[in-house]
Image (tube, rainbow, N blue to C red):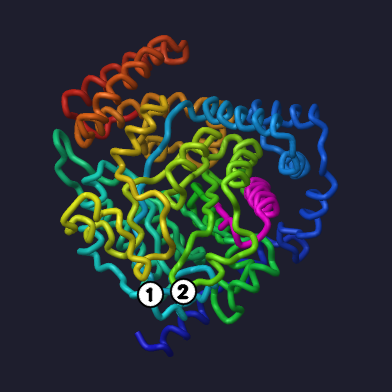
């Protein structure tokens, strides 16, 4: 595609009327002065006031901005310990003890943007550019399925060759792959998307082919910083086009949304407040907040000075704090910790309330297929920085991470039942806030964990997993909720069917 054709495409992407319709009196929902004032006014909070706010979180009620600002200003180590414990308690109350797994699949690193922190930016001449064909998408999907994954998040650069039509074809291709496993079969049952902001018309194309969650990260909510990192002559240079990407998705019928910020671009406390205001505005305009919130930390990227020298890089202690405050601020929303982080930090952060993570992660274009061609297990952890967007902190195999979590008493879930049963949007939000959805998820987690143990687990993981699944079954049989009507009887039959080799049964 010629440079002229690309430039013409860039000029027609942004639809101004699809920004203006969401503004209130010409203003968006991020007011920097208001946020900075809230963070300033609520310094040195009283311990009892903080404990009252924690109690509100434990009632699974979203916090107001001033309450979140109060938590962000806590300094006493003993109060932070109470907040860490409350974060895990909130998570268990809403989501039980399960961790949902997914695998990212990068389909293209072609990009018309020039973000200062990203290896994909068009000025980075060291990046080896590539876009997967549908045959290659199929091969990558087979490799991911071979690990045991059931859901994917598919990632694309912003470019006319990876437009909505290309994305739609990749979704259809991924859903069409089925691969024989040890006993049953494997497939991807949920395809989520991390892609550039689109028009309502393009988003409807994705809705029509069965898109799962639509994920767009604002990167930074601080407007001057955003402008400095994203050149004005690029699509991504338009702050509000990105800010209202998920509002447009709601109008297009996509009611399962995911927000996030790239921590390290600006002050982490400000970004937490920005994420909260984003959730609040979605709730205000559509009655539904984000299903998940992500909080990736900036890691080194090919040719990017900013990625290693930003004065706002977040240390491990502050990272744990920001995740905890997000858990308490939006207690019914899922939190995603990714393989950007080192294993020891992932363990620590999962303990304060995360609900989803990835493993066996390859973020180079064609990375999963390439890994299969390596000669040894150890070589599969190699990272090729000139083929990926950033560097990873955890390259362990899925089986290793599943076993580690089982040793921690947490069950791995590959469940996608809620989406296919219509438990999305306002329906799932109501079930999460009432702490009901987690009960159905507990049953489906056991069923999908059973599949994994029989189809993919190593002998070591299976032995540990069998003990955990016995504990889960014992709990389920004693919980009054499951003994109502025929729910327990239905589950017991499904579990036996799964043991016999039946796959993809869910409640």
Could you say where residue 475 lies in the image, as x and y percent from the top left?
Answer: 41, 14
Q: Is residue 414 magenta?
A: no
Position of the C terminus, as image quadrant, is: top left
Which residue occupies 66% across, 26% down? 59
Q: Is residue 13 above or below residue 347?
A: below
Callout 2 crowding tier (Cα within 10 Å): few <14, some 14–19, many ≥20: many
- Asked if labels 2 and 1 touch by Cβ distance under 8 angstroms, the answer is yes
Q: Is residue 239 above or below residue 442?
A: below
Looking at the magenta stretch, what is its main secondary structure? Answer: helix
Which residue occupies 82% across, 43% down? 42
Which residue occupies 43% across, 38% down? 422
- Identify residue for label 1: 127
Disc sitting over residue 303 in the figure: 2
**Would you identify the image quadrant in which residue 71 lies?**
top right
Could you say where residue 43 lies in the image, as x and y percent from the top left?
Answer: 82, 44
Q: Which residues are magenta?
A: 259-285
**Would you identify the image quadrant in which residue 446 lies?**
top left
**Secondary element type, mark 2:** loop
Could you say where residue 488 lies in the image, as x and y percent from the top left?
Answer: 36, 15
Which residue occupies 58% across, 81% down? 233
Could you say where residue 19 lies in the image, as x and y percent from the top left?
Answer: 63, 66
Q: Is residue 460 above or below residue 171?
A: above
């Amino acid at each position: 595609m010629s440079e002229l054709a690309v430039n013409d495409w860039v000029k027609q992407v942004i639809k101004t009327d699809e920004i203006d319709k969401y503004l209130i009196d010409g203003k968006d929902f991020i007011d920097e002065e208001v946020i900075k004032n809230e963070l300033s006014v609520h310094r040195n909070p009283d311990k009892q006031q903080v404990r009252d706010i924690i109690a509100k979180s434990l009632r699974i009620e979203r916090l107001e901005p001033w309450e979140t600002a109060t938590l962000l200003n806590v300094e006493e180590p003993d109060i932070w310990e109470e907040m860490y414990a409350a974060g895990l308690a909130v998570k268990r109350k809403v989501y039980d003890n399960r961790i949902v797994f997914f695998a990212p699949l990068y389909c293209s690193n072609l990009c018309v943007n020039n973000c200062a922190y990203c290896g994909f930016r068009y000025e980075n001449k060291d990046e080896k550019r590539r876009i997967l064909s549908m045959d290659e998408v199929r091969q990558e999907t087979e490799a991911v399925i071979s690990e045991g994954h059931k859901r994917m998040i598919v990632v694309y650069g912003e470019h006319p060759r990876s437009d909505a039509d290309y994305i739609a074809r990749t979704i259809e291709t991924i859903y069409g792959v089925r691969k024989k496993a040890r006993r049953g079969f494997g497939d991807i049952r949920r395809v989520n998307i991390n892609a550039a902001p689109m028009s309502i018309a393009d988003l409807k194309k994705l809705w029509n082919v069965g898109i799962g969650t639509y994920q767009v990260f604002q990167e930074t909510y601080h407007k001057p910083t955003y402008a400095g990192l994203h050149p004005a002559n690029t699509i991504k240079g338009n702050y509000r086009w990105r800010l209202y990407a998920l509002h447009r998705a709601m109008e297009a019928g996509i009611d399962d949304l995911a927000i996030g910020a790239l921590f390290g671009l600006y002050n982490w406390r400000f970004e937490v407040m920005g994420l909260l205001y984003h959730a609040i505005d979605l709730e205000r305009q559509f009655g539904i907040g984000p299903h998940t919130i992500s909080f990736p930390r900036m890691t080194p990227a090919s040719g990017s000075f900013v990625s290693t020298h930003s004065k706002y890089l977040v240390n491990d202690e502050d990272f744990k704090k920001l995740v905890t405050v997000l858990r308490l601020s939006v207690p019914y929303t899922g939190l995603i910790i990714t393989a950007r982080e080192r294993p020891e930090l992932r363990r620590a952060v999962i303990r304060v309330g995360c609900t989803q993570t990835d493993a066996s992660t390859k973020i180079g274009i064609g990375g999963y297929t390439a890994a299969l061609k390596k000669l040894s297990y150890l070589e599969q952890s190699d990272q090729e920085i000139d083929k990926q967007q950033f560097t990873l902190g955890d390259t362990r195999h899925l089986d290793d991470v599943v076993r580690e979590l089982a040793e921690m008493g947490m069950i791995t879930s590959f469940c996608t039942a809620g989406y296919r049963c219509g438990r999305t949007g306002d329906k799932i939000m109501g079930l999460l806030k009432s702490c009901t959805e987690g009960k159905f998820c507990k049953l489906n987690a056991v069923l999908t964990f059973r599949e994994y143990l029989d189809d993919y687990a190593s002998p070591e993981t299976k032995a540990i997993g069998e003990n955990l699944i016995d504990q889960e079954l014992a709990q389920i049989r004693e919980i009054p909720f499951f003994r109502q009507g025929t729910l327990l009887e239905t589950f017991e039959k499904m579990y036996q069917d799964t043991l016999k080799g039946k796959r993809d049964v869910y409640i």
